[in-house]
Image (spheres, rainbow, N blue to C red):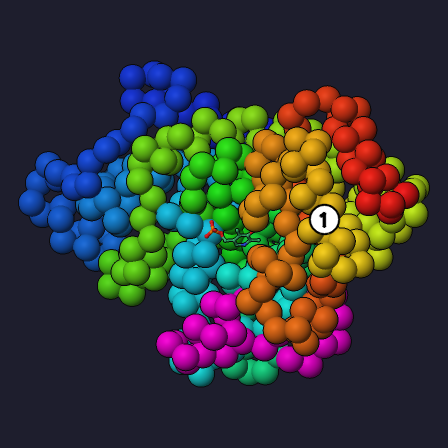
Amino acid sequence: MAFDPVQSLSRIRHEFGEHGGVNMSIEASTTFTVMAAETMPEIFLGEKGPDQGGCFLYGRHFNPTVYVLGRYLAAIEGTEAGYATSSGISAIACSIMQLCGPGDEVVASNAIYGGTFALFKEFFPLKTGINVKFVDISNLEEVKAAITDKTKAIFTESISNPTMVIADLPKLAELAHDVDAKLVVDNTFSPMLLSPAQHGADIVVHSLTKFIGGGSDIIAGAVCASKEFIAELMDLHTGAVMLLGPTMDPRVAFDLSLRLPHLGLRMQEHSRRAQFFADKLEALGLKVSYPGLESHPQHDLIESLTNTGFGFGGLFAIDLGTAERAYEFMNDLQQNEGFGLLAVSLGYFDTLMSCSASSTSSELTEEELADAGIAPGLVRISLGYTGTLEDRWDQFERALKRAKMI
Ligand SMILES: *Cc1c(COP(=O)(O)O)cnc(C)c1O
């Protein structure tokens, strides 16, 4: 049967709070007692833990509230386990550092979030000896050619940032598993609508800062994977999350837990509106990139991967030719129409728009931008769901006319 993230979450939410509350409880302790002194060494040895006797030790290790949020996120992704971190970038950094040591290699998509790109290209080789080879992830021959016996992970975003390239997850999983490497997928752009673990991904990472948080008010991240991998990350002696310490506050975990039950509805509405805009823009002859368009080169692929009923996501990109035209258009939308906000990030309830080449992807050189297909006038739009869709489209169309683009 097809995977249903909404059902999967709602089943696990039927485990109640401490006093039968409909919501989880906030456990604000940083340290936890044991009933017998003998239990403590067992926790240190990993013989007792949240899942083994309900034993907790210290808040940077496991916190019960953060742990429950991790289980909710795992339910949404359909993985055995999950744990939340203080940011998306820490979830990515810790996952890769857990899989790789000095001299090991990662094959990564060249069209990824700028911060991840900088982490992989500059920080890892310099500070950890982990080397990353960048490839066009939609070219499986290129991916295969980049794999060596040192490759420990293939890293990609499910829908790439900002070029909307779709990763062929089943094929990438096969390539990774052939050499005993893991497929690590950043699913920040497509929670609910795409479940990478159902298509062979071993580790799914998220920036909860975006769609999942939905309010642009919290920086947070998560790793969803096997029980074994989460245990490795949290190992008291060798775990990257435990020892580097990107710990989520339990109050934040509680806050985020309340946003998960309506995540599906929000994604549906983001998608419905983005599809409407993309259809209109394409009909007007503009250069628009959206996975829900039949003209998208990988439309059939994403259709074969997505869960039913959530559409194709809230982001589309439109190429306005030059950075100057892109700036002028965005200024007009924000200042004169009150449509959207000139800001980086995505997944907010209101529209956010930015010119990728000179903002979120400015970590890339001009050549790297060209390789990744990020044109100078490419505007990334994360479409919100405030106001009526009709009014929002009218505003956008007026601005397009003023810019003489239609
Ligand atoms: C924002 C983002 C990140 C980084 O997440 P933070 O929560 O800001 O640390 C990683 N990947 C993608 C695709 C993102 O959009």
The C terminus sits in image quarter: top right
User: Magenta residues, as a range?
Assistant: 117-146
Instruction: Identify the secondary structure beneath mark 1.
Output: helix
Q: Residue at x 54, y 42 (%)?
A: 210
Left or right, residue 186 beside residue 372: left
Q: Quadrant of residue 352?
A: top right
Q: Quadrant of residue 109?
A: bottom right
In this picture, is 329 found above or below 183? above
Q: Residue at x 58, y 64 (%)?
A: 362
In this picture, is 87 found above or below 310? below
In this picture, is 245 found above or below 348? below
Residue bearing mark 1 = 328
- The answer to if 77 sits in the magenta stretch is no
Q: Residue at x 41, y 67 (%)?
A: 97
Q: Residue type at mark 1?
A: Glu
Q: Main secondary structure of the magenta part?
A: helix
In this view of the protein, which residue sits in the foreground, 210 or 138? 210
Expressed as whole percent of the image width and height from the top left, the position of residue 82 reads 44, 46
In this view of the protein, which residue sits in the foreground, 396 or 221? 396
In this view of the protein, which residue sits in the foreground, 332 or 263? 332
Q: Quadrant of residue 235?
A: bottom left
In this view of the protein, which residue sits in the foreground, 157 or 320? 320
- The answer to if 126 sits in the magenta stretch is yes
Q: Residue at x 58, y 57 (%)?
A: 360
Left or right, residue 332 beside residue 16: right
Judge the density around disc 1: few (<14), some (14-19), many (≥20) Cα neighbours within 10 Å: few
Expressed as whole percent of the image width and height from the top left, the position of residue 331 reads 67, 43
